[in-house]
Image: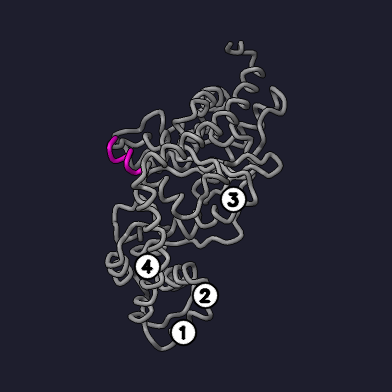
Amino acid sequence: MSADKNRPVLLSASGPSGNLTLGNYLGAIRNWVDLQDRYDCFFVLVDLHAITVRQEPAKLLQRCYDFLALYVACGLDPDRNTIFVQSHVPAHAQLTWVLNCFASMGELFRMTQFKDKARRHEQDVNAGLLDYPVLMAADILLYRTDLVPVGDDQRQHLELTRTLARRFNNLHGEIFTVPEPYVPEVGARIMSLQEPTRKMSKSDPDPNGYIALLDDADTVRRKIKRAVTDSGDAVTYAPDRPGIANLMTIFSGVTGEPFEAIEQRFAGSGYGRFKADLADAVIAILEPVQQRFAEIRADQAAIAAILERGAQAARERANVTLARVHDALGFIRAA
């Protein structure tokens, strides 16, 4: 269980939407595994964020369990990290209300993701969709987080978190740690197999655009065979050839080979052999994850025990911060 106060605190959150993909693994989850011995890590499944878009309850429940089991199957150790579900820690919602009173409407309406999601969900532009970044700020600030791994799509939200922390601190003293973005030393940016200029997404409506961590071998081979390439058939890396560049990035990510070695290996062989070998390499890295996932997922009592331990540790840390916030505001402490 994560509890080393001498190490910097790192928090990473993921929403239970769609299917966890090879892009999530190579770009984020594998990096998380490398971080767990260097940081006091909190990994939170943000189910409260998920309901800003309408969900089918049974499917949401299944995805939450699947995501958590996959995290552990990919190497996140519940004994070295705090792994928990957002809704199991009431302080997330409680601090959100406080931070709402320090955030301006203008700041929220300027959020790029709100604008994008409001366009995509015109029939359900709910208050939660607008308030999403404030809940994200609460997620981060509760744990006196030093570092937050963020992609380009979340940088604006993290900057709002930093703004709210400084605004509160300026009025009430040094209550919050102002977090910094964490840029991993390595981490492949994997793009869609069908639109290689767009990041691979676990919520992509086209299943051919991503490789899910639970895709079977035949599905992996089919998706890679159909993956978009570029004109010609040379296996060479170049930014102006996004299709083959993306597939080479995946190959490098799963095998550890540099682009130069990949180019030499497939010189003159064309896309056919390259795609076949790429599929074999992806399957080889997914099979042990899938086997471990099946074992973990079959023991729901064990998952529940992991979540209870994680929630207890998270509540203890979060409640200390919330109490300091309430004291600073002049609230009467609960008996």
Residue topped by disc 4: 283
Q: Secondary structure at mark 3?
A: loop
Q: Marks 3/2: CA distance?
A: 25 Å
User: Which residue position is annotated with label 2?
Assistant: 257
Tell me: 275 left or right of 140.
left
Q: Earlier in the sequence, mark 1 or mark 2?
A: 2
Residue located beneath label 1 in the image: 265
Q: Position of residue 36 (x, y in %)?
A: 59, 50
Quadrant into which the C terminus falls: top right
Part of the protein shown in magenta: 57-63
Q: Which quadrant of the figure contains the N terminus? A: top right
Q: Secondary structure at mark 4?
A: helix
Q: Name the amino acid, label 2.
A: Glu
Q: Give residue 220's position: percent from left, percent from top.
A: 32, 66
Magenta stretch, overall SS? helix
- The disc, 3 or 1, on the residue closer to the chain's N-terminal end is 3
- Rounded to the nearest whole Å, what is the CA distance between mark 1 and mark 2? 10 Å
For label 3, the residue is 36
The residue positioned 34% from the left and 44% from the top of the image is: 63
Q: Amino acid at mark 3?
A: Gln
In the rendered structure, are the residues bearing label 1 and label 2 in contact, judged by CB atoms less than 8 Å apart? Answer: yes
Q: Earlier in the sequence, mark 4 or mark 3?
A: 3
Is residue 254 magenta-colored? Answer: no
